[in-house]
Amino acid sequence: MGAAQVRHHGSHYPIDDTVFGLTEDQQQLRRTIFDFAQKELAPKAAQIDKDNYFPEMRDFWLKMGTMGLLGITASPEYGGSGMSYLDHVLVSEEISRVSAAIALSYGAHSNLCVNQININGTAEQKEKYLPKLCSGEHIGALAMSEPGSGSDVVSMKLKAEKKGDYYILNGNKFWITNGPDADVLVVYAKTDMTTAKPQHGVSAFLIEKTFDGFSTGQKLDKLGIRGSNTGELIFEDCKVPAKNMLGKENGGIYVLFSGLDLERLVLASQPVGLMQAACDVAFEYVHLRKQFNTRIGEFQLMQGKIADMYTTLSACRSYLYCVSRACDQGHVNRKDCAGVILYCAEKATQVCLEAIQCLGKVYVFQPPLLLLP
């Protein structure tokens, strides 16, 4: 292997998982996912971001399915792995360390879709949908947002009207992660437009991409997290069997909130993975780059940045794992599930900005270690 190739791949700053209280099995899980992500995803990550497209996504999904990652928290009875939310967080963190885009697609599939069905689905629904979602034969998504309803989710306009043994859906969804690719989607719609409390008129449905009246619209060209396909869903007299309702009629808000806290928890692993990646690159670079015949990592200013980055990352990781363990014990605290993603996301921005300062002149579209003299 040539010197340029060695520099391109670089090294990875070690994580002391004993400090974070991980079991030997969990430490082995991290090592396994690290090796998998570095081999199967890292060589492609930059091109995925550049092209906003992952042509091998289906094949990659099948590999993840074979490893038991797509249904990591789902019941083994339906093809899942029956593992913990902390395990889920560890997997997502290591994928994020390589590609934030594919990690987001993974989270939308494994948590927003699969975990919701596992928690709220009937035995018939689980038997029908979970096996292929867990194996990677199908890609999953969740559709909540619309052009006029993001955080104000209960103001949604997608309408579901009951007609015999079917519901007829009309309207659209927007900003849907995995929307352009998904085979199965958890979709929220209004089944009662007249209720005084709009949250009481929402229902959840399981939608297949082959349903009559369902189509996908524009794929969005995003500023970041490119390659995780995000787009519009269109429902034009879309005919959905009544048995595909997830939960009770007008009870969709309970389905939504049963998963929302756990979604925030799992997605908080992504900024932690990004921080780790920033430290991987910056820590190596400052110990190789020389100015004034001295490695810049020996200058006090740079040492201060490195210390702050490492401490911030460790604090975020500790908070994330602590909340994960609480959820695994059945204590799902809404404040902390929201707090951990807020804190980790804000700190990831700070750590990545510090990494840019460490890299200095190499703030260009090339691997930084290739630019060393």
Image (spheres, rainbow, N blue to C red):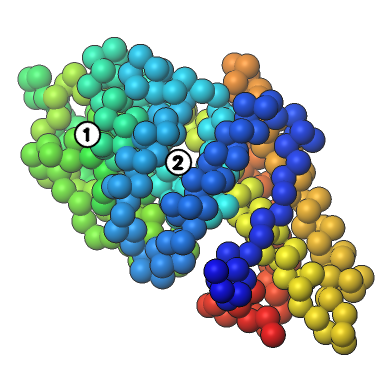
**As rendered, which of 18 and 353 lies closer to the eye?**
18
Query: Which circle's residue, 1 or 2, is located before the other in the chain?
Result: 2
Q: Can residue 91 be seen in this view?
A: yes
Write down the residue under mark 2: 107
Element carrying mark 2: helix
Write down the residue under mark 1: 207
Quarter occupied by residue 230: bottom left
> Is 235 situated left or right of 199 in this image?
left
Element carrying mark 1: strand
Residue 119: percent from left, percent from top: 41, 20
Q: Are marks 1 and 2 in contact (CB under 8 Å)?
A: no
Residue 90: percent from left, percent from top: 59, 37
How many badges with numbers are in the image? 2
**As rendered, which of 268 and 189 lies closer to the eye?**
268
Residue 373 drawn above or below residue 51: below
**As rendered, which of 19 and 346 lies closer to the eye?**
19
Quarter occupied by residue 256: top left
Residue 14: percent from left, percent from top: 72, 49
> Is 52 situated left or right of 285 in this image?
left
**Can you say which quadrant of the picture contains the C terminus?**
bottom right
